[in-house]
Image (cartoon, rainbow, N blue to C red):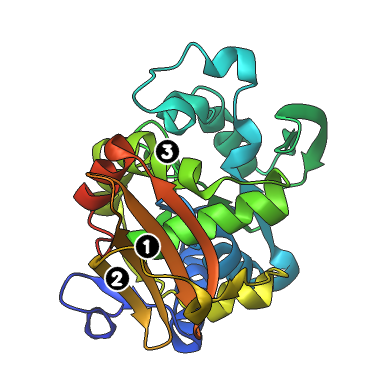
Amino acid sequence: MTPNILQNDRALEWTPHALQLLTEQIEEIHKKCGRPVVIAVCGGTASGKSTQVAQNLRDAIGERASLLHQDNFQNLPDRIRHLRPRYRGDDPENYGLSKIPNLLKTLKANQPVDIPNYIFRTRSHQGVRIVQPKPIVLFEGLYAAHHKIAKYCDFVIYVEMRALGRVLRRGYRGLFERYGRVNFANVFGNFCTSVMAAHMEFVIQQRTRADVIVRVLYTFSETLERFPIQPLIPAGDLPRPGPVIKEYTIDPETCLQLVGTNASRWMEVRFQHKAQLFFCFTAGPELSERILATDWNAF
């Protein structure tokens, strides 16, 4: 990767130009290796690894590339119960770390592999699909460059996005793509505890292994284009029960507000876009403390 296209922290802003540069870099790696190559695309939950980076790389490279998702190797519910409660489903051991190295070695040896199909709505595996070897294997996932896997990868892309964008994308993805329902209080609660614990202890370590860091800038318009989201009511129609404790701005028209209430240590969490309210929930003392302690501007 040409050094002068990177920012001071080695992060490359995700743009059409960045896509072209990465595509050319990947093709050059394959040319030098003379065999199938594995390109790991890792990073935080809902950071755009799959939909923004890996899928666009797959489309740009075309039929010479295959795209594998680490989510397909997740454990079934009875196995998740045995993982560390601190991380829950984001525990690295939930992502096929014992199986994936052999799978990648097989693909690099130009041999086909069987991949399980994980169904989020039922949290089950339904059959397998055969993946034929291709010159370029794009392997994306939360731990696609975990230390048990990284040595089998020829190039590592770490994708990052502000925490506020990731929690919003995670919530709406759960509603429209994975589970068919979502409780935003639970989404924020899980994100502030198990998701962030795993992110800070395990996920972010992969950043040091990255050949390039891709920074995806989040706008709510991207989520509106992706999902059929309807606002609740115009924000101006809501009474204001208390002062705005904190406000996190995504763009001039979009913000998350933490609003105080009359009850001590309680607060209301409101997400607004273009003077319309898209979700709102009341957080009790424990959840309020977790939300206030989270740096929603952090990558």
The amino acid type found where label 3 is placed reads Asn
Q: Position of residue 93 (x, y in %)?
A: 45, 24
Judging by the rendered image, the residue that carries numbered circle 2 is 248
Closer to us: 260 or 226: 260
Specify the quadrant that holds the C terminus: bottom left
Measure the C-alpha gap from mark 1 to mark 2. Answer: 8 Å
- The tag earlier along the polypeptide, 1 or 2, is 1
- The tag earlier along the polypeptide, 1 or 3, is 1
Kindly identify which numbered label has been placed on residue 269: none
- The tag earlier along the polypeptide, 3 or 2, is 3
Can residue 97 be seen in this snapshot? no
Measure the C-alpha gap from mark 3 to mark 2. Answer: 19 Å
Q: Secondary structure at mark 2?
A: strand
Specify the quadrant that holds the N terminus: bottom left
Count of picture labels:
3
Q: Quadrant of residue 164?
A: bottom left
Rendered view: 18 above or below 192 = below
Q: Secondary structure at mark 1?
A: helix
Judging by the rendered image, the residue that carries numbered circle 3 is 190
Q: Residue at x 18, y 70 (%)?
A: 9
Q: Position of residue 239 (x, y in %)?
A: 43, 70
Rendered view: 91 above or below 252 = above
Judging by the rendered image, the residue that carries numbered circle 1 is 164
Q: Residue at x 81, y 39 (%)?
A: 130
Q: Are marks 1 and 2 in contact (CB under 8 Å)?
A: yes
Can residue 102 be seen in this snapshot? yes
* Dot 2 crowding, Cα within 10 Å, few <14, some 14–19, many 20+: some
Q: Which is closer to the viewer, label 1 or label 2?
A: 2
Question: Position of 236 compared to 162: left or right?
Answer: right
